[in-house]
Image (tube, grey):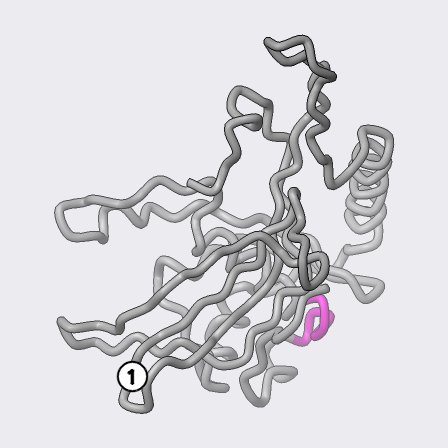
Amino acid sequence: SDVCSSDLGRVVRGFTVRDLAISRALVVPASEEGVETVFSMRPLPDSTTVSSAAWREFRVFSYGEGGWAEHCRGVVGVDFAPAPAVAAADGAAPATVPEMVGADEFEEGERAAREEMERAERVCGRKGDVGGMYDALAAGGLWYGPSFRVITSVATGGGMAVGRVAIPDTRSTMPMEFEYPSLVHPATLDGFIQMIIPALSQGDMGSAVHEPFVPTFIE
């Protein structure tokens, strides 16, 4: 676990991912051997001599015939709720724990997100055919299996889209029904990213998808 001892017991308010770059697809073969992958994480360098105390750089690699290949890299940080300063046992000044987002900025971001969601719900009045969207994506080369067809309803309008994403029962599909716990399951997170498609197609989800496309960078 990449958590400092000073962070133990603090309340996690959220996580921030930025500068996410996807350089190549990670193809998982259907064979029993699968594919060997490595997930690496280290403190983000602030300079050639100092590393960040709040941000971590992560990278995803796989090993194949050509050796190791990078698929993704980005920066992630844990945003803790403000904690009262506690002096050290030796009487020294309390240690300062870095925070990525101040309390005021965090609350402002939540308020802006709620307002944007309410505006989207008012504007998006055109109901979309979710089944038709997945069928069109499959025809265009993006085939989503049952565990990844998680959008259950969608509406579009004004260059935006709102919808509902179901949490799939992926545990029942795993060997021995074993699954590592996760804050947000990848299939659920993928459903949020899939909402880009109806937002771009604006209801014309059947004929607007002519070839597969996926985001490659998230600021």
Residue 1 relative to residue 111: left or right: left
Residue 200 is covered by the magenta coloring: yes
What residue span does the magenta drawing correspond to? 198-204
Q: Which picture quadrant has residue 44?
A: bottom right
Residue 126 is covered by the magenta coloring: no
* Residue drawn at point x = 58 percent, y = 76 percent: 214
How many discs appear?
A: 1
* Residue drawn at point x = 69 percent, y = 70 percent: 203
Residue 178: percent from left, percent from top:
21, 44
Q: Which picture quadrant has residue 79?
A: top right
* Residue drawn at point x = 65 percent, y = 30 percent: 80
Quarter of the image with the C terminus is bottom right
Residue 13: percent from left, percent from top:
64, 31
Question: Which of the pair 218/194 is nearer the observer?
Answer: 218
SS state under label 1: strand
Question: Which of the pair 94/61 is nearer the observer?
Answer: 94
* Residue drawn at point x = 73 percent, y = 35 percent: 99
> Would you place residue 1 above or below residue 202 in this image?
above
Residue 29 relative to residue 15: left or right: left
Residue 161: percent from left, percent from top:
72, 59
User: Mark 1 belongs to which amino acid?
Assistant: Gly
Quarter of the image with the N terminus is top left
> Would you place residue 15 above or below residue 138 in this image?
above
- Residue located beneath label 1 in the image: 64
Question: Which of the pair 22/60 is nearer the observer?
Answer: 60
